[in-house]
Image: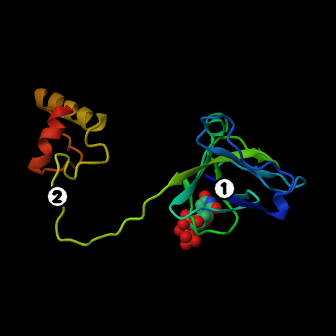
Amino acid sequence: MKVRVVQLAHGQGLPLPAYQTSGAAGMDLLAAIDVAHPITLAPGARALVPTGLTIELPQGYEAQVRPRSGLALKNGVTVLNSPGTVDSDYRGEVGVILANLGQAPFDIRRGDRIAQMVIAAVLQATLVEVKTISNTARGDGGFGSTGKTIAKQKATLRKSRDKKKAIPPLAAAPKKSGSSKARTRNR
Ligand SMILES: O=c1ccn([C@H]2C[C@H](O)[C@@H](COP(=O)(O)OP(=O)(O)OP(=O)(O)O)O2)c(=O)[nH]1
């Protein structure tokens, strides 16, 4: 598909974002900042970095602004609101909210590849208000209900019981009968 793009004055001269390989999902976004004024992101700091681009997404699509794994791994630099959402009706400049979660200051210079943009299809749903929704095996179990944390707490509980010691409280676990099977399977 084609997406119309305007390179703004401060983006002129920078290459347009492009897929680096035939199978790439994202195209790198470049920092369209003044060559004479690099940005230094102190540890813990964040900044809205301009890309110099406005885009015209067709209705039914979004652009996601995502971190680059290399920057994240090497420097602790990420997209704070990841994935950033560019709506199809947005006509302003695409910006990247970069955050430095690393321990060293991070320099951003003009043309640096700071993030990547993934174009994706979206569905708009119509919410229909009802009184009840259907039951499932999971029920309201979530936020780690099937993971190690619960298993670990249960093991501690068993140990405490064996030793007849004080029993630590379990993390709040849903008690719905419909969801007990699912949790038993994951013990
Ligand atoms: O990483 C991002 C996130 C958002 N935007 C732009 C495009 C998007 O369409 C618009 C609004 O974004 P969002 O809906 O996330 O922001 P909001 O805080 O809800 O603001 P608004 O009230 O303007 O929707 O800002 C970006 O350029 N980059």
- Residue 18, x across and y down, in percent: 71, 44
Tell me what residue is drawn at x 30 percent, y 43 percent: 144
Mark 1 C-beta closer than 8 Å to ligand 1: yes
Quadrant including the C terminus: top left
Q: Nearer the viewer, residue 36 or 133?
A: 133
Q: Earlier in the sequence, mark 2 or mark 1?
A: 1
Q: Residues within 10 Å of mark 2 (few under 14, many from 20)?
A: few
Q: Is residue 58 left or right of residue 153?
A: right
In this rendering, would 10 be left or right of 82?
right
**Residue at x 17% of width, y 71% of height:** 131
Nearer the observer, 21 or 108: 21
Q: Are marks 2 and 1 in contact (CB under 8 Å)?
A: no
At numbered mark 2, what does the secondary structure look like: helix, strand or loop? loop
Q: Quadrant of ligand 1?
A: bottom right
Residue named by callout 2: 134
Q: Quadrant of residue 12?
A: bottom right
Q: Residue flagged by tag 1: what amino acid is it?
A: Val
User: Label 1: which residue?
Assistant: 96
- Residue 20 visible in rendering: yes
